[in-house]
Amino acid sequence: MTSLKSCTGNIPITGTVDFTSQLGAQSLCRYFGFYMFSCPSLVICDPDLVKQICIKDFSYFSDHRPFLQKSSDPTVSKLLFARNGRDWHDHRRTLGSAYTQSKMKQMFPMLNECIRRLIHNLPRTKETISVNLHTLIMKFTNDLALNSSFGIECDSFNDSENEYLRIAQKTFVQSKLKVFGFRLAALSSKIAQVIKIKLFNEEGEAFYRKIVNETLTYRRANNITRIDMLHLLNEAQKGRLQYDKDDQEDKQDVGELVTGQGYGEISDDDVAMELMGLFLANFDMYGLLVCNSLYEIALHQDVQEKLFREIDEMWQSCDGNLTYEDFKKMKYLDMVYNECLRFRSPLMALDRCVTKPYTIPPVLPHEKPLHLKPGQDITIPIYCFSRDEKFYENPNKFDPERFSAEHKSSIDPHTFIPFGCGPRMCVAYRLVALQTKFIMFHLLLRFRLVPTEKTIIPFPEGKKHNILSSEQGYWVGLKSRD
């Protein structure tokens, strides 16, 4: 018999482990251990074991590691990703119905027009304009989130001092010191009480709660329906949303969540917190995904040329009236999006927490049964999988062709899990995909992305706090295609 304590190395961690330095361990074992401060975590290196943990034996690993203690920050416990146990299960069933394929199809016209209009407002000159994508996308995601959630029009490009952007930056942009505080607070309720750290500041919480309450009150009083995230979450709150014939893939993803018993009661405040969670994702992971993706497209002109051809052909064939069905036909755009997720996925690792006693049976000759106790931390290094030559040929090459119809069948699906897998995968992954592809489509319809003298090559990877980003900005050139 083997316990986790005996298979972990004595690796004190004061920030986060650089999992890329552990790539060699994956060829030697299916798992290894490391310490986060004094807490041991089991790192899963085997795709079959990932499937076992996230899907087959999900009920033993259904929780995330604690994010912030409820006693320290009651608000964070209302965010879906921070809920655990039956509370998460019931709210996931209710809120998940707002993010299905059929609901994204309903939102398609609004998202398409919103993103088209935002990009159309970018300055277009004969000269190449050097821009920091991080600054540009931060403004863009603020305006997009306001419009797609509440129907609020905002122009942060021309008014960078507007109240919406100011409060969003203050509320959702997390400093390195604050992220370090989150890690400390997650380890101990006593530490959380001492440092008194919260995910959102009081001004931000009050601001977005007010927007939600005022918008819901106005829409209800005037019988107004606008197909956006607030509407879909409000409909889910009332139990009016169902999984329909277009949502078979969603049913496969969440399994018994659809057919099981129990729905969570959703309050207006729960809706407000879910939307704040979306805003946080927009400014954090989603914003970095878009920046990472556009950076790679700028550096790979051959990929960009193929995108131009597909985008131009589609724009002409649909006569400027893009539909959901048209968008699904764009195979190369989908290939590029997936390769961006593999190559520069901002999230480097997933986590799980053991909920009841579990034994990992031995498979390799040197293994013994590994007994895990409730509360044991699990880490799944998704970035390592994506850069391992055992799973991908030339893994450090940006190559969308690996996701072509001819080649994607050779990819083990559990080595490509940028949003997680199984019932606990990111509930908004379809929304992220739709918004990211829209930005690529409409931006490349009007501009060519090119490197400039400010573009840093190679990509200056910052791997702190479990997020892959450039710590020196994302400088590229925008050149009008007109």
Image: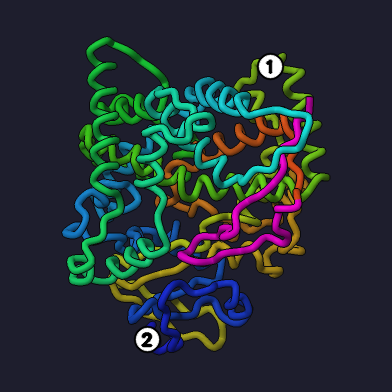
Is residue 204 shown left or right of residue 226?
left
Tag 2 near tag 1, CB within 8 Å: no
Is residue 57 shown left or right of residue 105?
left
Marker disc for residue 320: 1
Q: Quadrant of residue 382?
A: bottom right
Q: Amino acid at mark 1?
A: Gly
Percent position (x, y) of residue 379?
Answer: 45, 68
Observer-nearest of 450 and 337: 450
From where the camera sits, is residue 100 visible?
no
Percent position (x, y) of residue 290?
Answer: 59, 44
Task: Give the residue pinned by disc 2.
Answer: 5
Helix, strand or loop at label 2? It is: helix
Residue placed at 56% from the left, 80% from the top?
29
Q: Quadrant of the N terminus?
A: bottom left
Disc 2 to disc 1, C-alpha distance:
61 Å
Is residue 260 shown left or right of residue 47?
left
In magenta segment, residue 473 = yes
Q: Quadrant of residue 30?
A: bottom right
Percent position (x, y) of residue 355?
Answer: 29, 65
Depicted 225 relative to depicted 275: above or below: above
- The disc, 2 or 1, on the residue closer to the chain's N-terminal end is 2
From where the camera sits, is residue 132 visible?
yes
Numbered disc in front, either 2 or 1:
1
Q: Quadrant of the C terminus?
A: top right
Helix, strand or loop at label 1? It is: loop
- Magenta residues, start to end: 453-482
